[in-house]
Amino acid sequence: MFETLHFADPWFLLALPLPFILSRLAQTTSPAGRALILPDRIGHALVAAEGRSVTGQGRLPLRVGLLTAIWVLLVLAIANPREVEPVSALRVSGRDLALVVDLSGSMVRDDFFLDGTAITRLDAVKKVGASFVRGRGGDRIALIVFGSEAYYASPFTFDVEAVARRIEEAVIGISGRATNISDGLGLALKRMSNSEAATRVVILLSDGVNNAGATNPRGVAELAARKGIRVHTIALGPKDLDTADEGELGVVDARTLSSISRISGGESFRVRTTDDLEAVATALDELEATDSDGLSAEVFREHWPWPAGGALILMLLFGWRQSA
């Protein structure tokens, strides 16, 4: 159990004989006949440690024992006993992956199906997206959602389970009901600007047409290309601008999304069904493989609170005995 137990600061153990040394000095006088002068409390304690009482002989063994134990426990605590915990190596891919997800009003349309039951577009994204994220161990993942505005739903983290839960908790309307693709992608690029990851990737999913914000999505894609950030796009919805009737609602601008990925060096995907979405998740796993070596690190279980706590208890007992 304690095979890896060691002291982080073993040099403090050299202080163990210090009370004995001070006690001897307290008894030694200089050639001029002058004794070493110490504060009364320290002098009493040191004399007691030598077996001679200043106030009485009856309590000497207990007092000496308590003072000795207190000192030993304090020194042990300061030396910081600890042991190495067995841990699994954390896989690190060297990739920062930002998911940018559309939460505009059209995501509430129930034109997707799961096991024969109609579900909303958002429910399809939740199911497939959360599963996709949980399989991305080793990536540092962030979640950005957008409607009329864009905001950070989850910062970059290796905790893929936490990001998956945020996807599952997403609701329509929290960022407005319009579709601001430019701001969603722009926020992802801003967060990635200071990233030192070897690979930086954005996965942008939208089911609509950019109808909010002052920036053209293609301009943001050009910025991504200059920064070396790949943007994969997913155009979600049964119909797009090229196939829908004029004025039909709930259609996706697949052409613009495709141009974003082409400009930035990514891939574009067209999703009309839940099966399509699952196939895209598989394809992205192949495009951005997560195989990597583990990053090892030592994790310690600290044991100093035990001797420190013991010393505190004994000090309270010593104080109580002194006042009794």
Image (spheres, grey):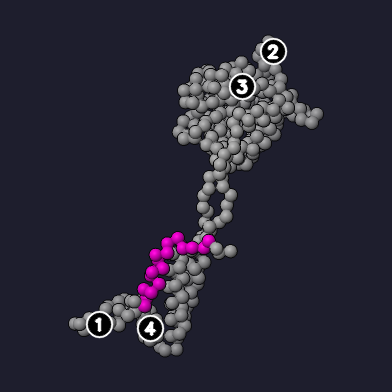
Q: Residues within 10 Å of mark 2 (few under 14, many from 20)?
A: few
Residue type at mark 2: give it: Thr
Work out whether residue 145 can be spotted: no
Q: Residues within 10 Å of mark 4 (few under 14, many from 20)?
A: some
Occupied quadrant, residue 25:
bottom left
Residue at point 65% right, 14% down?
A: 241
x and y percentages locating residue 154 in the rendered image? 56, 37
In terms of sequence position, does the residue under pointer 1 or pointer 3 come before the other?
A: 1
Residue at point 53% right, 48% down?
A: 296
Point out the stretch of residues depicted in magenta.
Answer: 4-20
19 over 206 or under it: above or below: below
* Disc 2/disc 1 C-alpha distance (Å): 105 Å
x and y percentages locating residue 229 in the rendered image? 51, 27
Q: Which mark is residue 29?
A: 1
Q: Which mark is residue 268?
A: 3
Residue type at mark 4: give it: Glu
- Front position among marks 2 and 1: 1
297 over 93 or under it: above or below: below
Q: Which mark is residue 40?
A: none
The number of numbered discs placed on residues in the rendered structure image is: 4
In the image, is 79 to the left or to the right of 296? Answer: left
Outermost residue to the left = 32
Q: Residues within 10 Å of mark 1 (few under 14, many from 20)?
A: few
* Disc 2/disc 3 C-alpha distance (Å): 18 Å
Does dot 1 land on a helix, a strand or a loop?
A: loop
Viewer-side residue, 263 vs 48: 263
In terms of sequence position, does the residue under pointer 2 or pointer 4 come before the other?
A: 4
Q: Which mark is residue 50?
A: 4
Residue type at mark 3: give it: Ser
Residue of label 2: 243
In the image, is 52 to the left or to the right of 108? Answer: left
In terms of sequence position, does the residue under pointer 3 or pointer 4 come before the other?
A: 4
